[in-house]
Amino acid sequence: MLLSYKSRHWLAAIPNGLLLVIMVVLSGGFLHLKAQEKLQKASAKLSDPLVAQTYTEGGISVDFSIQPVSSGTVRPELLTGAQALVRFRIHDAGNQSVSNLHPSVWFDRLEPGQLTDARSCREKIQSFLQPSFARRARLDLNSYFILALNHEPNISVIDPLNGFGGSKLYALIPLAASGADWVISPDKQRLYVSMPTANQVAVIDTVTWKPIASIDVGPMPHRIVLQHDGRYLWIANDENRPDGITVLDTVTLKTAAHILTGSGPHDIVLTDDDRLAFVTNKIDGTLTVVDIRRLAVIKTLKVGQLPIALSLSSLAGAVYVANAGDGIISAVDVTALTVMAQIKTEPGLRTIRISPDSRFGFAANQITNKVFIFDTASNRVREAVAVGAGADQIAFTKGFVYVRAPGSEFVTMITIADLDRTGEVGVTRFPAGQKAPSESAASSLAEAMTPIPGNDGVLVANPADKMIYFYTEGMAAPMGSFQNYRRDPKALLILDNSLTETSRGNYTATIRLPEAGPYDVAFLLDSPRLVNCFSTTIAENPANPRSATNILAFEPLLKERIARVGEAYTLRFKVTDTNSHQPRASLSDVGVMVFLAPGVWQQRTIAKAIGDGIYEVAFVPPQAGVYYVYFQVPSLQVPFSANLPLILQAAKN
């Protein structure tokens, strides 16, 4: 059977290609319709992309539908660039929903007049399961991207499963300056990054992985927090003088307000209903409360010496403030807006986090190298756990609390289940690299640890090793690692594009619709075994016409996937018109730029036309590493930035 995309995903972290994934073509369990009947039904589906479609096999049915999220027209349409809700309902013959499944889905654009039968559908899915730069679906609803915020002014986008020429670096996003903090929008369409030395916030499109804008947001923006509804981005302006926060309207990308709170640095936390914002003022020793609807200060509280971090407990109805100067954790009632309790620990607190169930709090002390665990019901310290030097970050999975200490290569794990028992809690450690992170100059407010999908392990960035380590629970050491290609990763995020079971048997995802045309929506379920290609059509959006820079597609035609250092490497590629889908031959100004990441060597040249829209260019890689290849055609106003680059790897003989 075809191996599930998701079940193979994190296996890609195992080094040196120790895993060999063998794809076996399915021999049964597919459509039993005759080919002609299948083609006729597919043709009918294409005529109305909004009509729900159902596929049944072995007593299990899959209902597929796709609807625009919003539409200003009388009759809704699927328009390129707009958002749509993709939904699969899986149920049995008795119409009982089937839960806890992991379907894999791809959107693949068809050529005009092309239809898909059962055989070509499963061949298509098999090709998607085999990593290839040249054969990618237009939309992959199974993919996870690892984002690394680097010490250098850029962001690495790593595809953990798919790779090309040995590289898993999917994209490299340039920034105007090194980032300090970041956040992804609720719809996963945008990434916001604060850049203190540029006094700006970068806005990045997570579909194209290209910067949308760099916005001036006041002096030294550091911590950024996005409202739960995505409307306002709250930005801390960290200069040690009476200052405060900037509120950015994410719709207009303009400043909605600048609110004076006190002398920073600042941390920010919002209530679950986006009603109140709490802002620490470290130098003043105060906590400012802001009414979000009025964007106005309503109260300022004295909370302790050097308040440095915040966390919200919805269960306790309190915001907890960690004070670095006196070690006091102040609990502020979010309704009465008063300090209802003070928890004594030790000076040197650095961060505070409330567990996902809101029952316990964890405060890391970077001077005494302890984590203080307190109960949010009683507001009393439960235990102090020894951790590594300079403990500064805390992350959660279902089973464990993870504590990073930049002065040590080891990550400490605290067993959550032990908190419900008397006696000491279980504490273990694992090495996340060869060096202590503090050996690198890279540091960030953003988290260097993030849970993996499945919530049973973490990724850990180690800037000193220039690596990202993948740890799964139950192991004594990381299962594997991902290279960051000679950059210092200081923070990590995971962008999960996969379907989510939003209710029993309903698997959904919100997508941005790609270019216009007919599409196969390829569906794979391992158990029970189901394979089918549904159909839909996306229309041109009159409000968002296709950019002239997207009129050409560049498809690599490769014999060798890995170049050799010091030897000429010939790259052939095909240029196709994206409107007519015909090859563009005899272009005399197809420019090719090749550069070695992170930009220490580059070569620009004009490609030679071979015929039938095929071109070639040669270059000699000077050293081992990852190479980006960009294409341009000035006569057609197609710049280097119009398409995602081809990524190659060069190795020594």
Image (tube, grey):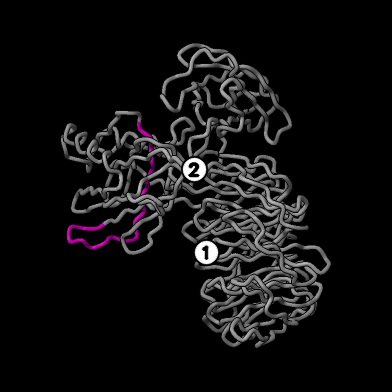
Q: Quadrant of residue 275?
A: bottom right
Task: Give the mark nearer the N terminus: 1 vs 2.
Answer: 2
Closer-to-camera residue (258/53): 258
In the picture, the quarter occupied by the N terminus is: top left
Q: Which residues are magenta?
A: 91-110
Q: What residue is pinned by disc 1?
A: 229
Q: Residue furthest right?
A: 241
Q: In the rendered view, would you say 606 is above or below 534?
A: above
Q: Residue at x 29, y 52 (%)?
A: 527
Q: In the rendered view, would you say 123 is above or below 161?
A: above
Q: Is any atom of residue 568 visible in this view?
A: no
What x and y, as percent, mark residue 313?
A: 57, 77
Residue type pointed to by label 1: Asp
Q: Quadrant of residue 290?
A: bottom right
Q: In the rendered view, would you say 502 is above or below 552?
A: below
Q: Is any atom of residue 602 visible in this view?
A: yes
Q: Please give the label number shown on residue 312.
A: none
Q: Is residue 149 magenta?
A: no
What x and y, as percent, mark residue 214?
A: 68, 48
Depth check, mark 1 against mark 2: the one in front is: 1
> SS for tag 1?
loop
Q: What residue is pinned by disc 2?
A: 161
What x and y, as percent, mark residue 264?
A: 78, 68
In the picture, the quarter occupied by the C terminus is: top right
Residue type pointed to by label 2: Leu
What x and y, as percent, mark residue 106?
A: 38, 42
